Image: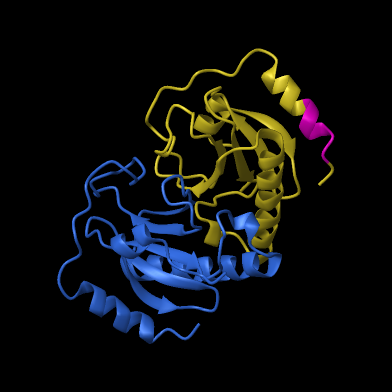
Chain colours: A blue, B yellow
Amino acid sequence: MEFTLASELARDSYHLADWPLCEVRVMNDRQFPWFLLVPKVADVREIIDLTEDDQLQLLRESRFLCHWLKAEYQPDKLNVAALGNQVPQLHVHHLARFQTDVAWPAPVWGKQPMHPLEEGEVARLQSLFADITF
Amino acid sequence: MEFTLASELARDSYHLADWPLCEVRVMNDRQFPWFLLVPKVADVREIIDLTEDDQLQLLRESRFLCHWLKAEYQPDKLNVAALGNQVPQLHVHHLARFQTDVAWPAPVWGKQPMHPLEEGEVARLQSLFADITF
């Protein structure tokens, strides 16, 4: 079976880059710097469903994204989470959180409606990520 | 500086085992099988604050705990998350979630008050974890 992105993820986020294991995507919500890593592996719901090699690669890509989030946004806290109760396809949330954001200190999920990204933001991020050689 | 468990984690959870990197703890909430891995490293807030070796060890311990959760509870979904907006000391939540649990499909944090574990449950878990040689 081939990897196909879940329709909810395709609807709510934009493609930024293809890394060795994961699609990097940004959620369409201007309230938070909110990124996803989606392993391009068919039929995977849990991190432990990946091979050990792919788990290691996910850790590497997550680490890289976390360092980038810290450098780009200087957040007060990172949130990294694999939940998937609503969309079971494995996707790992990476958020830069601020004491001043609308959800702080609660988690971001299901609290407030999404506010679409500002015009040009997806193109700006795609251009930034195009310069990252992993 | 020596590792000291954050007071909120000491208040809300019980010690189950010491693994090579982490304390394994169970949250005092009977509504969910809800465990924590707390790396025994001083002054660490983010996964990327750990050394790369410790990140690998955290992945190993997380993987082990996830497999154990699946075997013990047969959940519909695992939730694995490093948030720390309220308690910045690095701790990684590991939850077994069910379509029938009180928070489903929302995340568990900050939705409903905790209901203490049943009497004997901590001792039962401590005894189970005592038999696990990591």
Q: Main secondary structure of the magenta part?
A: helix
- How many callouts does the rendering have? 0
Residue A131 against residue B116 in the figure, above or below: below
Q: Is residue B63 left or right of residue B50?
A: right
Is residue A20 in sight in this rendering? yes
Kindly identify the residue that appears in the image at 76 percent across and 49 percent down. Answer: B20
Viewer-proximal residue among B112 and A63? B112
What residue is drawn where x is 56% and y is 24%? B28
Residue furthest to the front in view is A1
Seen at 56% across and 22% down, the residue is B30
Choose top left, top right, bottom left or bottom right for residue B106.
Answer: top left
Compared with residue B66, is residue A78 higher up or lower down, i.e. above or below? below
Tell me where the magenta segment starts and ends, as one range.
Answer: B127-132
Along the line of sight, which residue is nearer the eye, A15 or A81?
A15
- Horizontal placement of B64 versus A118: left or right? right
Q: Is residue B4 visible?
A: no
Q: Is residue B27 above or below residue A74?
A: above
- Image position of A5 (left or right of B56): left
Residue B90 % position (x, y): 53, 47
Residue occupying the far left of the picture? A119
Q: Position of residue A90 (x, y in %)?
A: 51, 58
Give the residue drawn at x 65%, y 54%: B58
Q: Magenta stretch: residue B14 in it?
A: no
* Nearer the observer, B50 or B33: B33
Residue A105 position within the rendered picture, expressed as x and y whole percent measured from the top left = 33, 41
**Where is residue B64 drawn, in percent x and y?**
72, 48
**Residue B5 falls left or right of residue A109:** right
Task: Identify whether A131 is placed above or below B65.
Answer: below
